[in-house]
Image (cartoon, rainbow, N blue to C red):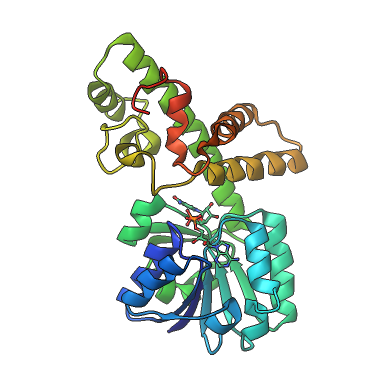
């Protein structure tokens, strides 16, 4: 397939790489020229704008930080909608609010195109391994149509229902993730303070009832899980500012649905504190540094 791919960050770059490996023809755009060069070295073509990236494309994938970036990439003068042929699907894997999805669905429809929310989970490791879960705001027929492309990047492709329900699933999942990471951080830092070897504690939790992804795959304590961002200075993972955005999406959604969020509200303030301390670009598991004695592993 001829694919226009926009957004080559921590997630987008490995996802685009897997599409190239699977034999798709990619034209890519990102504001970061170094990220573009890495894809060009792997066989993709570089474009000077989103509009140029999607010219002649049979499908478009966007993987951008937030709704404002998706809006400008879609609707800007050199944007996707200005350059796209009729009848092309725009698959957006960014995590954004359901209201913006519905707005983009209408804009794409007016242009003769289809906008599909297909956010992902699995982290940068899942993106590199091609094992992401895609939460598609569409029905089983839509998933079948998207499978040839999405299965090069993910192993679970789930039909969530009508447009925007992919984002509903993603926001609820990340609400759990933000809370569990804070919980694992509290427990690991307490264990350290009480004198247990963090690797022993991590091993116990991971074979006990406290086990979760935040503990067994992405443990925030340095050295417990070698491949986790904690082992490389909290770089190259899921930025705290992105987690803070997702906690904001959850609290906004809860407000409009008139539902309480007790744990989510506290977790949001923890990530906001990390961000206010100037560490918003570090992986969100660095939230553990709020609990550890200054200097410990920092
Ligand atoms: P990132 O910040 O690493 O990458 C975003 C990329 O978008 C950057 O390369 C940036 O240059 C580019 N960009 C920004 N504005 C642009 C524009 N106007 N035109 C072209 N390119 C532009 O973010 P990420 O970690 O790859 O996350 C992307 C999305 O996926 C976010 O919505 C995030 O919440 C979600 N997500 C991230 C993870 C993760 O583990 N990192 C996991 C699941 C979902």
Residue 275 falls left or right of residue 102: left
Q: Quadrant of residue 254?
A: top right
Q: Position of residue 70 (x, y in %)?
A: 63, 64
Farthest top residue in view? 194
Estimate the x, y position of residue 239 in percent, counting from the top left.
48, 45
Q: 11 or 126, which is in the foreground?
A: 11
Which residue is found at the position 71% from the left and 63% from the top? 102
Q: Residue at x 75, y 38 (%)?
A: 255
Give the camera-side residue of 163 and 38. Answer: 38
- The percent position of residue 125, horizontal first and vertical second, equals 34, 52
Q: Quadrant of residue 209?
A: top left
Q: Is residue 196 visible?
A: yes
The N terminus: image quadrant: bottom left
User: Could you say where residue 290 lies in the image, as x and y percent from the top left?
Assistant: 48, 24
Q: Evaluate whether residue 122 shows in this view.
A: no
In the displayed structure, would residue 10 be above or below residue 144?
above
Task: Give the position of the C terminus as an image quadrant.
Answer: top left
Does 266 sit left or right of 2 as displayed?
A: right
Q: Nearer the viewer, residue 99 or 34?
A: 34
Determine which quarter of the picture holds residue 103: bottom right
Q: Residue at x 51, y 69 (%)?
A: 30
Number of marks drawn: 0
């Amino acid at each position: 397939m001829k694919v226009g791919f926009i957004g080559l960050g921590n997630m987008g770059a490995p996802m685009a790489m897997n599409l190239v490996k699977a034999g798709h023809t990619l034209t890519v755009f990102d504001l970061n020229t170094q990220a573009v060069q890495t894809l060009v070295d792997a066989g993709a073509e570089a474009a000077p704008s989103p509009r140029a990236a999607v010219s002649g494309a049979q499908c478009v994938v966007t993987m951008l930080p937030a709704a404002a970036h998706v809006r400008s990439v879609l609707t800007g003068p050199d944007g996707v909608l200005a350059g796209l042929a009729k009848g092309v699907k725009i698959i957006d894997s960014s995590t954004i609010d359901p209201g913006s999805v519905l707005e983009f669905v209408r804009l794409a429809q007016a242009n003769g195109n289809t906008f599909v929310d297909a956010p992902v989970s699995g982290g940068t490791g899942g993106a590199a391994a091609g094992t992401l879960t895609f939460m598609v705001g569409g029905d089983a027929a839509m998933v079948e149509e998207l499978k040839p492309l999405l299965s090069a990047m993910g192993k679970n492709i789930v039909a969530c229902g009508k447009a925007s329900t992919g984002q509903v699933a993603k926001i609820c999942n990340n609400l759990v993730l933000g809370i569990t990471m804070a919980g694992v951080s509290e427990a690991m830092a307490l264990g350290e303070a009480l004198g247990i070897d963090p690797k022993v504690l991590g091993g116990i939790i991971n074979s006990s009832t406290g086990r979760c992804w935040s503990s067994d795959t992405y443990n925030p304590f340095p050295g417990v899980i070698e491949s986790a961002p904690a082992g490389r200075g909290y770089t190259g993972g899921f930025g705290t500012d992105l987690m803070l955005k997702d906690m904001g999406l959850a609290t906004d959604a809860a407000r409009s649905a008139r539902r309480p969020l007790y744990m989510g509200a506290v977790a949001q303030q923890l990530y906001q504190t990390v961000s206010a301390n100037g560490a918003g670009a570090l992986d969100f598991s660095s939230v553990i540094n709020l609990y550890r004695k200054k200097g410990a592993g920092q």
